[in-house]
């Protein structure tokens, strides 16, 4: 029996919270990255607040807590952290929109240091992803590139920031592919979409 078929069999026996976590991360990242890349007007950016709070944030945080029950330290740490990331993002954006937080000329630096903190976290998760699967490694590799580009872009380099948006879209689609693979492989009890085990 191949490694991927074994994964499907295990998934059929034990519900995999990663499907929800990846979907929440992917959808929310896709929406924000469309704005970051300049494909949608900046005036409509606040539409991301709902998904950031409830899908990328709350749903992903819940998926992370369920991963703890399966003993998956990688999934638990990743989903819990990025759930908290999106909740924090939604909070900061909302507070700025209603005028509670007034960053003024320091807005770029505030966004930059926020992103750099999560870049550091993502770097060691990216290294760990090389022991998970090709699909997960692709997500964390594109996310690492996305974060680095957004870090630089936040400090005044708008063209580089847009590239962060482009890579964010690729990262989001990678996450959605992996979520779809978990769901479809489980439902059909066979490998419909490969994820490429690395172990």
Image (cartoon, rainbow, N blue to C red):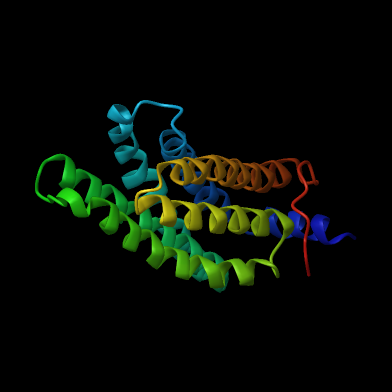
Q: Is residue 149 above or below residue 123?
A: above
- Residue at (40%, 56%) from the top-left corner? 83
**Which residue of the protein is positioned furthest toward the right in this rendering?**
1
Q: Is residue 125 above or below residue 34?
A: below
Left or right: 11 in relation to 24: right
- Residue at (75%, 40%) from the top-left corner? 188
Q: Residue 170 appears at what percent x and percent y?
A: 60, 42
Q: Quadrant of the N terminus?
A: bottom right
Q: Nearer the viewer, residue 172 or 79?
A: 172
- Residue at (70%, 70%) from the top-left corner? 131
- Work out whether residue 106 can be spotted: yes
Q: Quadrant of the C terminus?
A: bottom right
Q: Residue 135 appears at what percent x and percent y?
A: 69, 53
- For the image shown, how many numbered marks are present on the structure? 0
Q: Nearer the viewer, residue 197 or 9?
A: 197
Q: Nearer the viewer, residue 151 or 55?
A: 151
**Which residue of the protein is positioned furthest toward the left in this rendering?**
100
Left or right: 142 in relation to 109: right
Left or right: 112 in relation to 192: left
- Residue at (12%, 50%) from the top-left corner? 102
Q: Nearer the viewer, residue 56 or 163?
A: 163
Q: Residue 55 appears at what percent x and percent y?
A: 40, 44
- Work out whether residue 70 can be spotted: no
Q: Residue 162 appears at what percent x and percent y?
A: 47, 40
């Amino acid at each position: 029996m191949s490694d991927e078929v074994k994964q499907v069999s295990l998934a059929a026996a034990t519900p995999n919270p990663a499907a929800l976590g990846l979907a929440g991360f992917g959808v929310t990242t896709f929406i924000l990255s469309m704005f970051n890349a300049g494909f949608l007007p900046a005036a409509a950016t606040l539409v991301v607040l709902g998904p950031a709070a409830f899908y990328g944030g709350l749903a992903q945080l819940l998926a992370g807590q369920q991963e703890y029950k399966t003993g998956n330290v990688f999934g638990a740490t990743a989903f819990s952290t990025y759930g908290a990331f999106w909740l924090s993002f939604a909070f900061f954006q909302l507070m700025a929109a209603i005028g509670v937080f007034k960053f003024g000329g320091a807005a770029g630096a505030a966004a930059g240091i926020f992103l750099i903190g999560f870049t550091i976290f993502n770097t060691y998760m990216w290294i760990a992803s090389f022991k998970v699967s090709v699909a997960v490694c692709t997500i964390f590799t594109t996310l690492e590139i996305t974060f680095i580009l957004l870090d630089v872009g936040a400090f005044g380099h708008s063209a580089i920031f847009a590239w962060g948006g482009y890579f964010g879209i690729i990262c989001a689609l990678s996450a959605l592919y992996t979520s779809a693979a978990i769901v479809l492989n489980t439902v059909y009890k066979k490998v419909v979409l490969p994820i490429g085990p690395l172990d």
